[in-house]
């Protein structure tokens, strides 16, 4: 894929609430909400990449569960291939992030009102639709 990136992100759900993270001001996409994660390196397994990114970014170990959504979105001529996975297990709570200035838990019904990074919108729609879903 030329001029594109493969990105993986983690959907934490706890007691019906979903974790959203706001990209810190000054970074590309600053102020937008997203799921924590990052780029898959060449030759890397996507789930392994997500475990690595969450360890680096949030300082916790996770077991990666089912794929919620994979979508490709073109922004300013750049293809963003984003896979959002459910988190199955974690060894601690996500409290602080190296890339974000806010980590917040939202009810599913609140998600749609946030200013999300565009590639995340298909996953957000799926999570919002499942209003009765438990984690
Ligand atoms: N982490 C993450 N990135 C996302 C999401 N949605 C979305 O469009 N992106 C974009 C923002 C960035 O352009 C790219 C991921 O970059 P990043 O800065 O988080 O990843 P990284 O840690 O591997 O990168 P780097 O800072 O080491 O260069 O994907 C999302 O939900 N989570």
Image (tube, rainbow, N blue to C red):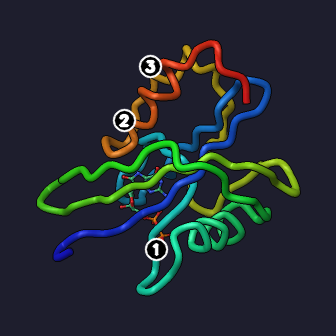
Q: Which of pointers 1 and 3 indicates the residue nearer the eye?
A: 1
N-terminal-most mark, 1 or 3: 1
Q: CA distance from mark 2 to mark 1?
A: 20 Å
- Where is residue 37 drawn, in percent x and y? 55, 60
Describe the element under mark 3 as helix, strand or loop. Answer: loop
The circle drawn on residue 40 is 1
Which residue is tagged 2? 122
Q: Which of pointers 2 and 3 indicates the residue nearer the eye?
A: 2
| Proximity of marks 2 and 1: CB atoms separated by less than 8 Å | no
Label 2 CB less than 8 angstroms from ligand 1: no
Residue at 60% over, 44% down: 11
Residue 39: quarter of image: bottom left
Which residue is tagged 3? 113
Which residue appears farthest toward the right when viewing the image? 91
Which residue appears farthest toward the front when viewing the image? 66
Residue at 12% over, 60% down: 77
User: As rendered, which of 111 and 16 lies closer to the eye?
Assistant: 16
- Where is residue 66 drawn, in percent x and y? 60, 49
Quarter of the figure that contains the N terminus = bottom left
Residue at 44% over, 54% down: 83
- Where is residue 107 drawn, in percent x and y? 64, 19
Describe the element under mark 1 as helix, strand or loop. Answer: loop
Residue at 71% over, 69% down: 55
Which residue appears farthest toward the left when viewing the image? 77
């Amino acid at each position: 894929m030329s001029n594109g990136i493969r990105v993986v992100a983690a959907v934490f759900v706890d007691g019906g609430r979903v974790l959203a993270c706001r990209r810190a001001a000054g970074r590309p996409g600053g102020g937008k909400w997203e799921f924590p994660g990052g780029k898959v390196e060449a030759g890397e397994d996507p789930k392994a990449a997500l475990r690595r990114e969450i360890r680096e970014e949030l300082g916790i170990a996770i077991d990666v569960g089912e794929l919620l959504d994979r979508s490709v979105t073109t922004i300013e001529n750049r293809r963003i291939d984003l896979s959002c996975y459910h988190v199955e297990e974690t060894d601690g709570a996500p409290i602080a992030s190296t890339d974000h200035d806010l980590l917040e838990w939202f009810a599913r019904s609140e998600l749609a009102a946030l200013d999300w990074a565009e590639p995340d919108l298909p996953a957000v729609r799926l999570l919002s639709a499942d209003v009765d879903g438990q984690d």
